[in-house]
């Protein structure tokens, strides 16, 4: 079990901040390379994997969407391959159910062509173009004029994967301390002083080197350590609907629309999870708290951070129509379902119930552009993972290797 506090440990060769899947993968990788090293992982919540890791649909992405040459493109393809192998070794169910990305009108064919070209450039296994008849064979209730079929897309419970990573960290001699929120970072001659607090009171640890994978709070810790203010994390709440059990046969695996190429969101899609529940979503609504799992939750500091950032207003000005649509989806189950009926015409509002919610920690530049790749910044004695939304869970093992490579160079 995780230790409730880290007061006993005053120094460590490595400190990792953040107990989501990326932080745990990084800690695991560091200990695999330096088994003699001391390592402390600090997590602000009482449980590991409580935010983006544990609140997703569990899709193992194949690497179709991402610009060739980007970190996401390379690490997603590598990471998916490694993740399937890891799950097989550890007895964690990871099903290659496949996915259809469907075009429902002629105006979407150009974007579908671009996705196909990206997928092939990225080396996505088995990707192929299919016509209406094959769409019906793969997903009998779906309709499309053309689609991409990705047989290597799968589903898994990322909480179970994260728990297995945590087991490896402890087995390698690392200490996992939950309920410890980092409140201060200060580089000194002896190391990076990391102040943290929790139910047991305030404490500090001196790190020879630190890696901060703090998700929605990553920008604040980075700035605290001397990194640039840009990009700023802006939280987007994603709500899912869930198909009622008697209607779950409408979807065999995953059905996605052709996404808006200007946004790093994939559109409202249907996914059969590893638990055989079928989710519709998520929405993408900017919210006033970085943990707004309840829609009305607002934290004044988080809201002020959103409103004070120039990029927020530039984003809103550019995509206000999209924002209005997302608000309608949050307010109306019928409007949400209507979007999915373009490719699943038998779906009705009565077929769905409220599902889970999550927060995407999306990095936003000052100019209003949404950051569409992983971002890692370096400060004295530390690396900061500034943007790691989807497909970070899929990519976690490969991303951890890249971060550990950089940590070795930075701490040499």
Image (cartoon, helix red, strand yellow):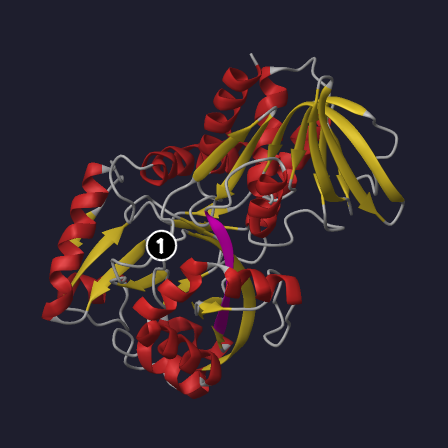
Q: Position of residue 100 (x, y in %)?
A: 27, 59
- Which residue sits at x=37%, y=63%? 315
Q: Residues within 10 Å of mark 1 (few under 14, many from 20)?
A: some
- Which residue sits at x=55%, y=62%? 358
The answer to whether 146 is drawn above or below residue 382 in the figure is below
Q: Judge left or right: residue 50 versus residue 323.
A: right
Q: Position of residue 355 (x, y in %)?
A: 54, 72
Q: Nearer the viewer, residue 156 or 197?
A: 197
Q: Judge left or right: residue 388 versus residue 105.
A: right
Q: Please say whether residue 233 is one of the residues in the magenta stretch.
A: yes
The answer to whether 145 is drawn above or below residue 19 in the figure is below
Q: Position of residue 206 (x, y in %)?
A: 76, 25
- Which residue sits at x=59%, y=75%? 295
Q: Nearer the viewer, residue 47 or 307?
A: 307
Q: Nearer the viewer, residue 388 or 85?
A: 388
Q: Judge left or right: residue 294 versus residue 368.
A: right
Write down the region rendered in magenta. Answer: 231-241
Whether residue 1 appears in this view of the structure is no
Q: Position of residue 76 (x, y in %)?
A: 38, 39
- SS class, disc 1: loop
Quadrant for the N terminus, please. top right
Whether residue 358 appears in this view of the structure is yes
- Which residue sits at x=21%, y=67%? 136
Which residue position is annotated with label 1? 367
Specify the principal SS of the magenta part.
strand
């Amino acid at each position: 079990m995780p230790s409730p506090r880290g007061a006993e440990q005053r120094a460590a060769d490595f400190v990792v901040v953040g107990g989501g899947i990326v932080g745990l993968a990084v800690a695991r990788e560091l200990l695999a390379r330096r088994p003699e090293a001391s390592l402390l992982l600090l997590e602000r919540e009482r449980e590991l994997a409580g935010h983006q890791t544990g609140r997703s649909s569990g899709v193992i992405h194949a690497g179709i969407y991402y610009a060739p040459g980007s970190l996401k493109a390379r690490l997603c393809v590598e990471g998916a391959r490694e993740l399937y192998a890891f799950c097989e070794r550890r007895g964690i169910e990871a099903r290659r159910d496949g996915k259809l990305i469907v075009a429902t009108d002629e105006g979407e064919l150009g974007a579908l062509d671009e996705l196909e070209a990206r997928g092939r450039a990225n080396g996505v296994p088995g990707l192929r173009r299919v016509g209406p008849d094959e769409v019906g064979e793969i997903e009998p209730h779906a309709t499309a004029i053309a689609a991409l079929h990705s047989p290597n897309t799968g589903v898994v419970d990322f909480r179970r994967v994260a728990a297995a990573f945590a087991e490896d960290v402890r087995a390698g001699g690392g200490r996992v301390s939950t309920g410890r929120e980092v409140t201060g970072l200060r580089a000194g001659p002896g190391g990076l002083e990391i102040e943290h607090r929790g139910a047991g009171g305030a404490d500090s640890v001196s790190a020879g080197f630190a890696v901060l994978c703090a998700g929605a709070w990553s920008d604040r810790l980075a700035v605290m350590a001397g990194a640039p203010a840009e990009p700023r994390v802006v939280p987007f709440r994603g709500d899912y609907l869930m198909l009622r059990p008697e209607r779950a046969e409408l979807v065999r695996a995953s059905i996605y629309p052709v996404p808006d190429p200007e946004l790093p969101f994939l559109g409202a899609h249907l996914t059969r999870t590893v638990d055989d529940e079928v989710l519709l979503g998520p929405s993408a609504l900017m919210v006033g708290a970085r943990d707004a799992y309840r829609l009305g939750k607002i934290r004044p500091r988080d809201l002020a951070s959103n409103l004070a950032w120039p990029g927020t207003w530039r984003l809103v000005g550019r995509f206000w129509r999209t924002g209005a649509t997302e608000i309608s989806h949050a307010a109306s189950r019928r409007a949400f379902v209507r979007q999915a009926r373009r490719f699943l015409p038998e779906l009705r509002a009565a077929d769905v119930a409220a599902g889970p919610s999550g927060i995407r920690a999306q990095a936003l530049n000052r100019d209003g552009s949404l950051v569409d790749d992983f971002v890692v910044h370096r400060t004295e004695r530390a690396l900061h993972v500034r943007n790691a939304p989807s497909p970070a869970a899929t990519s976690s093992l490969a991303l951890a290797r890249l971060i550990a490579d950089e940590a070795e160079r930075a701490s040499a």
